[in-house]
Each structure stands twice: as structure tokens, then as C-alpha cells.
Amino acid sequence: MEDAAAARDFERAARLRDRIRALTYVQGAQDINAEGISEADIFAIHSEGGQSCVQVFFFRAGQNWGNHAFFPKHDREDDPAAILSAFIAQFYDGREPPSLILANETPDQAELLAEALTLRAGRKVTLATPQRGEKRSIMDQASMNAREALIRRAAENASQQKSLERLAEVLDLEAPPRRIEVYDNSHISGANAVCAMIVAGPDGFEKKRYRKYNIKTADLAPGDDYAMMREVLTRRFSRLMKEDDEETRPDLVVIDGGKGQLSAALGVFVELGLDPQAEGIAVIGVAKPRRETEAGEKRVDRTMGAVGEQVALPGREPFLLGPRDPALFFLQRLRDEAHRFAIGAHRAKRAKSLGQNPIDDIPGVGPSKKRALLNHFGSAKEIARAKKEDLTAVEGISAALAQRIYDYFHG
């Protein structure tokens, strides 16, 4: 690597650097492969400041198959033993436990928990807390990982809280938002239209609460983003009003777009008889600044767009956030995540539609008849163009089925 760098072959030096890192990781991982542990899950909990992290190591066939950090929600006064007991019970709800489970704290009602896991697995499951030896060394490693992960999480949460506080200040909110919903459309000229909703809060992005909405309006004009947004917000907030669930009620709704998109969103609330201000829901639009060209076209102003975002609020003129404002970076992260999720949902829908064939929806055309039609005509497009007499020439296609196929494509 050093020779390549000295020769100014930086691409090769970077590849060698990555190989060194990979080898170092593999060697480091082998340090926690313990003899005598063939199949086991190791749980280590660390609690501090009313929050906890549970680090789980997985051993299978005598090898360490990796680890994962979890951050269970619990009451501030709950003790680690009770948290760990509830976590382990929930962890194996739907997955088979190994023959050995090790924990750095003895869970509450450990014997009862082990019996329940034994019944689930249909074989003996041992739940133990090692006190010495190699198993204890691995447990100490897992405990240290849990502690470091909790420290990182606390630092991230502190940064997130500062961003939320600054956002509340910029938007004149009474308090930092607890739940933020961001909406973004994705389509190609109206085809395979999808609207994505992401959720963020004090703990960052809450991916389990993400939702994607397939646009259902049949007479929608291609590319009508306003109509798409109206449909999705109508569906979302109609359901919210029926369920009246405080936990899923947003404090802030962010629309990817300017004044037009914001007006469409506010129109939905008027139609539903929902007063966002009275309900404590702030609604804003976020868009790149645009300028009007000599030809009268409105285009993204790259000179301004590189340094800021335009925020539209009800009853106020849109304003530009400064280039170093923490609220700007936070809103950009929210919008970029919504855009990423929307693009992914759109691509998945488009890929699915590409694999579909129009003749799949014709009653009476099963796999064998579909294959015979495609072999005879070559494509669904040619089948759609075929006359009834041509269809009956295909083996297995009766006159009645030929009429049905013809009617399907010709209305």
C-alpha cells in the first residue's frame, strides 16, 4: 500500500487499504470465537440514564456469526434484569432459540423463561450467566459493545434533539416536534405512481413506521403531483381521524414541494374538517429555490439551491434557510430520506409491472394456453391485434375463449 502511494497509484493504494481493513476485521472477529460454544446466543445489557442497549452475539457451528445492538423501550425505573427478561421473551417470539442462551444479568424468572423456551424449541434450552472462563470473556466483550453502542446512541440523540429544537425555533413551534411525517411523490410521467411517507422523531428515522401509498385515482392526469398529494393525505388523515391515535399523530408534516404543494395539502385538511393549528399539527413545504428565466420558465436556481432550501409556511411568504443553519441540514436529511424511500418504492412497483403480462388477467387463460398464444403470436401486443379467426387457430383456444380474448383487448 505504501509503495503504491509513493508511486502515486492512489487507486491501487486504496484497494490495498480496504483489503488490510477487511483482514484486520476477520482477525479481530476470530478473537471472540470461543471453544466449547457450538450453538448459542449471548445477550449483554447495559443501562444508563433511563435507556438500555442489548447486544446480541450469535454463535452457530462453533463460529461467531456476528452481533446486533437493540435499544428496547422501557420505563425509566425498570431494572436491567426485568428488561432483559422481557426482551429475551420477545426476541424468540417467532424464532427458534438455540440450545444455550448466555446473559450478563440473570433475567427475572429465569427458570420459567428457560422452560418456556424449551417448550417452544421442543428440546432442552439452557439459560445461564457465566461467572468465569472463556464464556465470561466473551460476555465481557458483549457488555463492552453494549455500553459503547449506548454511548453512541446517546450522542446521536443529543444531536437530534438540538436539530429538533432549532427546527422548532425556525418554524415558531411551541415545542420540538415528537413525530415528523415527510411526504414525497415518485413516478415517470404518471406511470407507476407512488407516494412515500417517512417518519422521524427524537430517536432519528423510525423505519418501521414508513409507509408507501400506491396512487389509486383512476382519472388522474399523468404527472399531476398535486392530485397525488391530495389523494394520499386524504387517505392518511381520514384514517387518523377515525383511529384517533395520539401516538401516530404528527406534530409536523413536511411536504416535498413549494407553495403549490402546500396549498394542496392545506386544502385536504379543509375538506376533512381538520384544523391543523387547533390539533397542534404544523404543515410546511420544502423545495429548492426557483427563478424565472427570460422565457418565463421557472427553474431551480442552482446558485441559491446549492446553499439553502426554501420553506413555505401557511400565511407567510416563503423564506430561505441559511447555508450553515442546523435546521437546513436537518430538513435536507429528511427530504433526502423521503426521496430515497419514494424512489425505491417506485422502482419496485415498476419492476413488478414489467414482469406482468396483459393476458394474465383474462379469465380462462392458464399457463399452458398463455404459452401456446405467445408461441404462436410472439408477444402480447400481437395477441391484442389478432382477429378472432386467428385466435381460434391456436391449439387449445376454443371459439368462446377466442371471443373472450378479443373482447378483452377491444372493449
Image: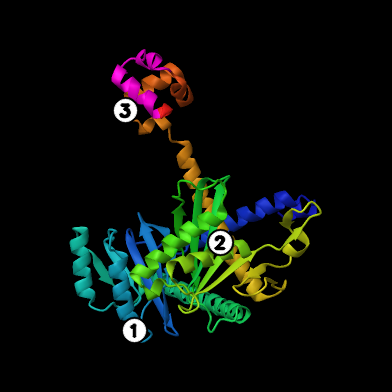
Tag nearer the camera, 1 or 2: 2
Which residue is labeled 1 in the image? Answer: 78
- Along the line of sight, which residue is nearer the eye, 1 or 405? 405
Please state, as top left, top right, bottom left or bottom right, where the C terminus lies in the image.
top left
In this picture, residue 188 sits left or right of residue 77: right
Say few, some or many: other residues with alpha carbon within 10 Å of mark 3 (under 14 / 14 to 19 / 20 or more).
few
Gap between marks 1 and 2, in whole Å? 34 Å
**Sooner in the amino-acid sequence: mark 3 or mark 2:** 2
- Reply yes or no: does residue 404 show up in magenta: yes
In this picture, residue 349 sits left or right of residue 388: right
Tag nearer the camera, 3 or 2: 3
The secondary element bearing badge 2 is classed as: helix
Gap between marks 1 and 3, in whole Å? 59 Å
Vertical comparison of 51 with 368: above or below:
below
The secondary element bearing badge 3 is classed as: loop
Which residue is labeled 2 in the image? Answer: 337
Magenta stretch, main secondary structure class = helix
Residue 76, how many percent across, how many down?
38, 85
Tag nearer the camera, 1 or 3: 3
> Can residue 162 be seen from the camera position used here?
yes
- Along the line of sight, which residue is nearer the eye, 314 or 346? 314
Magenta range is: 387-408
Gap between marks 3 and 2, in whole Å? 42 Å
Residue drawn at point x = 28 percent, y = 63 percent: 93
Residue 366, disc: 3
